[in-house]
Image (tube, rainbow, N blue to C red):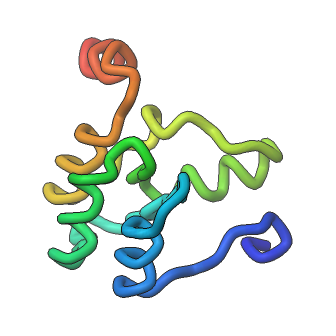
Amino acid sequence: LLQEAGAEVLTASETVAKLSADGDPKVVIVCSDNDCKIPETVEGQVRIQKSQVQVVNANWLFDSISCGSVLEAGWYEPKGKQAKELWALTMLDASLIRSKAGA
């Protein structure tokens, strides 16, 4: 499914290389559980290239496939502490985070 949609699964080193490359790469980090461990090298690049990254829980992937379009990451906050921090960092629409916290 991912390949048919033009996506690819990356290792940590491939993710770092993609985020370090010229151009406008887009990376989605899908966290499937409470203990989603993101390697330090990847985390460092996410912090630098935060506008090019989305960090989401696994429901985002399935819902996006079901809807046939890329859904807003703001509604798919991951559960793990590190992933939550990166999710908040990468959110472009701070009002979405505030409205979700108030819900």
Measured from the top left, where is residue 78 in percent x and y? Answer: 33, 52
| Residue in the image at 36% along x and 86% along y | 13
Furthest-front residue in view?
22
Q: Residue at x 43, y 33 (%)?
A: 74
User: Residue at (57%, 80%) from the top-left corner?
Assistant: 9
Up-down relation of residue 89 to residue 61 (above or below):
above
Residue nearest the observer in this picture, 37 or 41: 41
Work out whether residue 32 can be spotted: no
Q: Residue at x 35, y 75 (%)?
A: 16
Q: Please state, as top left, top right, bottom left or bottom right, where the N terminus lies in the image.
A: bottom right
Indicate left or right for 8 with 16 as reference.
Answer: right
User: Taking the image as drawn, is residue 100 in sight?
Assistant: yes
Whole-percent x, y for residue 35 in the image: 22, 71
Q: How many marks?
A: 0
Q: Is residue 15 left or right of residue 83?
A: right
Q: Position of residue 89 (x, y in %)?
A: 24, 40
The one of 64 and 22 positioned closer to us in this rendering: 22
Q: Give 52 or 9, whichever is nearer the viewer.
A: 52
- Residue 66 appears at what percent x and percent y? 78, 50
Compared with residue 62, is residue 41 higher up or lower down, i.e. above or below? below
Q: Quadrant of residue 88?
A: top left
**Image quadrant occupied by the C terminus:** top left
Relative to residue 76, is residue 26 drawn left or right? right
Q: Above or below — where is 49 with respect to 69?
A: below
Front residue of 54 and 50: 50
